[in-house]
Image (spheres, rainbow, N blue to C red):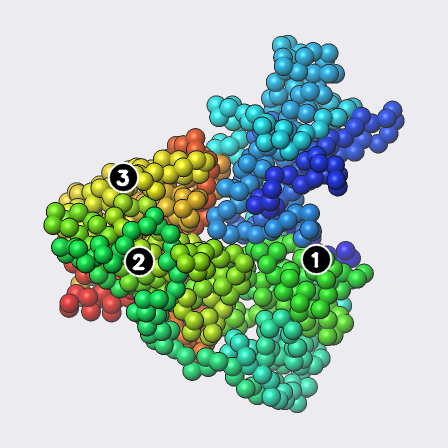
Amino acid sequence: MAGRVNRISGGLDLSRRGFMVAVAGSGLAFSFLTACSEGAEIKAFEPTQWFSMAPDGIVTVNIIRAEMGQHVGTAIARILADELETPWETVRINHVDTDPKWGLMVTGGSWSVWQSYPLYSQAGAAGRIALIEAGAKILGVDASSCRAENGEVLSGDRKISYVAILKRGALERVFTPEELAALPLKPVAERRLIGKPVAALDVAEKTTGAAVYGIDARIEGMVYARPLLPPTRYGSKVVAVDDSAAKGVSGYVQSLTLEDPSGTVPGWVMVIAETYPAAIKAAGLVKVEWTPGPGADVSEADLQKRASELISKADAGAVLDTGGGDASAAFRAARTTLEATYTTSTVLHFQLEPVNALAFEKDGVFEIHTGNQWQSLILPTLAQALDRPETSIVMRTYRVGGGFGRRLNGDYAVPAALAAKALGKPVKMILSREDDARFDSPRSPSVQKLRMAFDAKGEVTAMEHHAAAGWPTLAMAPFFMPKGLGDVSYDPFAISGADHWYQVGVQKVRAINNDLANTVFRPGWLRSVGPGWTNWALESFLDEAAHKLGLDPVAFRLKLLTGEGRNAGSAPNAVGGALRQAAVVRQTAEKAGWGGALPANTGLGLATSFGQERNMPTWVACAARVSVDRSSGQVKVEKLTLVTDAGAVIDPDGARAQTEGAALWGLSMALHEGAAFEAGQVRERNLGAYTPLRLADTPAMDISFVESLEAPVGLGEPATTVVGPAIGNAIFAAVGARLRHIPIRPGDVLQALRG
């Protein structure tokens, strides 16, 4: 495409069935190239759409996952390269644009490596087997006598390189889907790349500035758009636009009121100019009169009040299937009970790169140039907004300057596309930091009520967890919502984490949609999603229960992590179940010096989790050492100790970086980050008021991973879920103050100290 800055693409869908069929109607998963005729040009060897090998041996792996700093391409490419037995220096990654052949394109939920591993392992193994068979034929030996190693096929003292095989073009092997599924993978002992140190494939471009992000996208003849946002997310209507003062700005073009059939950006006015500075200056002079939609007077307190009201309604929400039993009867029969309510504030994404999009039509195709985490989700919305087939829209993939779930919602592409359609020319829209905050899809504020029942011996006989918050999946992907008891749908990403692995007798988990939140704003997925706030309540409550019983909090958790019944775990992802969670608890406590002497007003708190989802558990525990200033209420986190069991770790350096970042985000949300709705809008709109963790407040960190041969699972989010409750529990251990709301401010600590 003329004018394209760079072609950096992204992604692959691993939730699809097996491999794509290479030849329509053939019934084959893929086929290899036939032998080249004498003198014919040798083409690349493409055993599957997921990778190709050039005649010089360069392997290009196609990635549909978004690169957001997590080196996802490196992790996925090494899975394939390890099975293929190709040298790492021959591997390249290609982040692809949208195309129906890729299937579902989404990057989130810590799914990328987990879902990619089976697919890319099979693809690499198939390539290796085909090369061995072709090499054996050339060498004149039986394939069973051959092995592949470091880009060569070897048989005794004879060998032939992959490059020599490729240059002969003699690859004819084909596989049925059944054969693919039965392919033998390399023994773990023979892995040469998985779990070993290698250089990330995208470091050079990022450190030299060669990496191209959505905000960098340009094309000849484009104009810039600066949006004027309405007073409410939904239902606002433009009454009048006065741009008379803006006409004096050099480069100002016009103000455009968007007509959006998709309902994504109602009431938006786009100020168009030839340069971005001109658009900013003109936007400050354009006056717009709106009729606001619903929620214009709603505050954070209103949202929390509504959540509490819904929790008090016994028939509100959906109850998850946790194995049966009558929780109400168990509580009536209990000798004693414990009950507590926990709350969390609104949390914004505040990713470094504000959302942006460049849109235009070229040769009958509408192109959207932007960084995005879930292309498959926004494409149908764009089709509706533009009134054209989804197949005529392409999203060009760029590096993402911070996603954290914000770019799972690709709503920001819609206004740029609508403006480009209306003007008939390319439009580049960049939101300011303030508008990015206002137009964010924040993590909803939440209210959670937990109850536990005990018998005469102090044994836990029942537990209930009721959680109310705005539901992001309902707002953006309702097709992704499963059914609970009574065939009632619920948002799994607004309750995951509450359906824990502790043995608590009769267990009841209820997910409740805060309908007021979903009316006022568009709730979003934010790094760690449900467990980021459900685990705050769960692990704080477990600590309270331990103290009520006079038990050590670590010993109490271990007592409940029995690995029995539904908590025993199952193959392939949850082998060992709760016993693996118990193991990370033990290791974390030991590494942190649990039970040792500490200075006055200093405490050690522990929390654990299974990370994201029960069918993809990442076992993690955190011990936080904190000191509390009783006079000011200031909390200083001195050290975080984390142990993670994520199965086989594919990329050790990436795993450590992911865990460090996730843990620090958890700390930031526990003590620093928190917004509030005021008159239907978030009050904190820039970094002067919204104050994430600063470098000076970063604690020492001790991070380790359990060596494991089990299936690899997610690492991008689990550590986020345990730091907050570990800090809250440490504050109680230090000064006896129990905090039940995050973020924890100094004033909250002082109030808790006063009782």
Badge 3 crowding class, 10 Å Cα cut-off, few under 14, some 14 to 19, many 20 or more, is some
The CA distance from mark 1 to mark 2 is 43 Å
- Which one is closest to the eye, mark 1 or mark 3? 3
Residue under label 2: 465
- Sequence-first disc among 1 and 2: 1
Residue 665 lies, in percent from the top left, at: 40, 55
593 to 472, vertically: above or below:
above
User: Which residue is depicted at the point 64% across and 60% down?
Assistant: 379
Q: Which residue sits furthest right?
A: 39
The residue lying toward the viewer, choosing from 202 and 22, is 22
Left or right side of 135 for 473: left
The quadrant in which residue 159 appears is top right
Q: Secondary structure at mark 1?
A: strand
Residue under label 1: 394
Q: Amino acid at mark 3?
A: Thr
Residue under label 3: 562
The CA distance from mark 1 to mark 3 is 50 Å
Residue 247 lies, in percent from the top left, at: 68, 86
Q: Quadrant of the N terminus?
A: bottom right
The residue lying toward the viewer, choosing from 516 and 348, is 516
- Sequence-first disc among 2 and 3: 2
Badge 2 crowding class, 10 Å Cα cut-off, few under 14, some 14 to 19, many 20 or more, is many
Q: Amino acid at mark 1?
A: Val
142 to 184, vertically: above or below:
above
Left or right side of 210 for 482: left
Q: Which residue sits furthest top?
A: 157
Q: Amino acid at mark 2?
A: His
Q: Can see residue 2?
A: yes
User: Which residue is depicted at the point 34% across and 48% down?
Assistant: 323
Residue 681 lies, in percent from the top left, at: 45, 76
Badge 1 crowding class, 10 Å Cα cut-off, few under 14, some 14 to 19, many 20 or more, is many
